Amino acid sequence: MGAELIDGKAFAARLRARIAGEVAALKAAHGVTPGLAVVLVGEDPASAVYVRNKGKAACEVGMESFEHRLPAEVSQADLLALVARLNGDPAVNGILVQLPLPAHIDEAAVINAISPEKDVDGFTVLNVGRLATGQRAMVPCTPLGCLMMLRDRLGPLGGKDALVIGRSNIVGKPMAQLLLADSATVTVAHSRTQGLPDLCRRADIVVAAVGRPRFVQGDWIKPGAAVIDVGINRTEAGLVGDVDFDAARRVAGAITPVPGGVGPMTIACLLANTLTATARVHG
Ligand code: GUN
């Protein structure tokens, strides 16, 4: 028997519908419309697509979207001035600065200039620290979406053996923190990890976020495991994940496809965070 597909697209559509309902209720009760400001620096085509999709998704659930496009040569001072203006703007509840930023800009300085209460990416050191210490935090969108799908599929995650492959600040590290907070037994693997196939064979939950096409092999998967594929790799064969999907689906209990798995959940969780940020001010 093959794995059940975890349909991130359908899951995200349900989440967006719920958010739209709550946005309408917030408007009716408090006359407030959640506002999301998205900042894009430079002309990177992939980033431009992501930013456009984020703005569109915000509008579709009844939020206000403010898009700020700055040239690649913008000075750090000007970018920081924009962030400061958005921090002080009561119509803006969530701020997202699309990464990566051009090399001349200190990314950490810009991210940490975002008000932690408007940090809907959950990237500021304050929110990272809050998550790591079990305090109320804004949680990064991609791992939040993965967690929602895992809880939905598996129920409580306590005691499960989870392997996170990848240690990025955006996905791997916060994913590990979230799984730990749910009492899973968490291993974080990365490019220097030895014996990865055997680590993987022990895991009830595999989250693959390494950015290498079809890196995780089918015979690394424990029968019945839940496999979440965060990878989006553009290859000659089209978009593929970090997992060899065709092989892994024969062994896994549940698996996310690429595309249509984690991707749609990331944007839905951004909207969820924007709603949360708004409700904390006006709710
Ligand atoms: N670049 C790639 N993923 C992300 C994300 O989730 N947020 C931001 N701000 N930039 C990104």
Image (spheres, grey):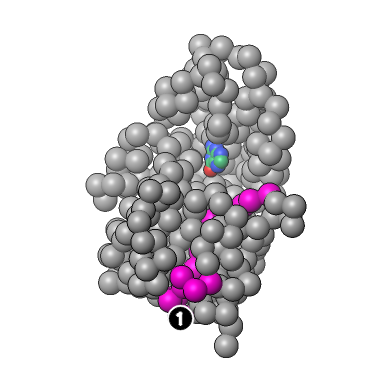
For the question of whether residue 96 can be seen, the reply is: yes
- Could you classify mark 1 by the number of other residues whose Cα lies within 10 Å: few (under 14), some (14-19), or many (20 or more)? many
Ligand 1 quadrant assignment:
top right
Residue 75: x, y in percent? 56, 12
Q: Please say whether residue 200 is one of the residues in the magenta stretch.
A: no
Towards the viewer: 97 or 47: 47
Q: Circle 1 is placed at which residue position?
A: 223
- What residue lies at 24% left-to-right and 47% top-to-bottom? 133
**Does residue 235 sit above or below 112 in this rendering?**
below
Towards the viewer: 271 or 129: 129
**Does residue 189 sit above or below 248 in this rendering?**
above
Residue 128: x, y in percent? 34, 41
Q: What span is in magenta?
A: 218-234
- Secondary element under disc 1, as helix, strand or loop, is loop
Label 1 within 8 A of ligand 1 by Cβ: no
Report the side of 188 relative to 96 (left or right).
Answer: left
Quarter placement of the N terminus:
bottom right
- What residue lies at 51% left-to-right and 19% top-to-bottom? 105
